[in-house]
Image: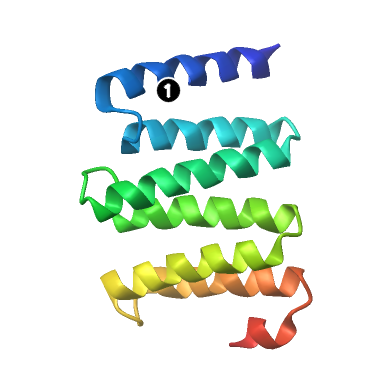
Amino acid sequence: GQHAEAENMFLQSLNMEQQLYGLESPEAAATVGSLADAKSDQGQPEVAAQLYARSAALLEKAEKAQIAGAECHVVCKALVRLADSCDLLNKTKEAEECHERGLEKLEEMLGPDHPDVADQLQMMGHSYKAHGEWQKAEF
């Protein structure tokens, strides 16, 4: 149905982006993230988590190389999506690591008192709470 059609479009887009921009481009990473969203919507959380991990890794690599399209906010969003996916799979340690990497990036770029840092802390708190780690949720 529509899920298969959407997945096919994402795969076609990914193929084109990899040919145009390279296998590890931010554009390709964004499409991998969209494909992960589709897999998540289809009830395939394990596949989605693998794709979110790939997307985040590609974006982090591009960020280190200072490639346009892989700015801190883009990378942090990918890490949050991966963390959320890990939370759904009860991979608490992996989720925590993703949230912490995102927090470090935001604090480094924006400073500790920025509203985006507060949002990241809130997401981390929800993750800790969901796994019964009340002490960590209070920071």
Which residue lies at the image location 27% right of the left edge and 55% below the top edge?
Answer: 64
Which residue lies at the image location 34% right of the left edge and 22% below the top edge?
Answer: 17
Number of marks present in the image shown:
1
Which residue lies at the image location 76% right of the left edge and 70% below the top edge?
Answer: 131
Position of residue 38 measured from the top left corner of the image (x, y, whole percent): 61, 30
Q: Amino acid at mark 1?
A: Leu
Q: Is residue 117 above or below residue 20?
A: below
Q: How is the image coloured?
A: rainbow
Screen quadrant of the N terminus: top right
Position of residue 36 measured from the top left corner of the image (x, y, whole percent): 58, 36
Q: Is residue 127 above or below residue 27?
A: below
4 left or right of 55 in image:
right
Screen quadrant of the C terminus: bottom right
Q: Which residue bears the numbered disc 1?
A: 14
92 left or right of 79 in image:
right
Task: Pick whichever, 13 or 91, lies toward us.
Answer: 91
Q: Residues within 10 Å of mark 1 (few under 14, many from 20)?
A: many
Position of residue 77 measured from the top left corner of the image (x, y, whole percent): 45, 53
91 left or right of 13 in image:
right
Q: Residue furthest right?
A: 132
Secondary structure type for disc 1: helix
66 left or right of 57 in image:
left
Which residue lies at the image location 41% right of the left edge and 36% below the top edge?
Answer: 30
Position of residue 123 measured from the top left corner of the image (x, y, whole percent): 57, 67
Quarter-of-image position of residue 58? top left
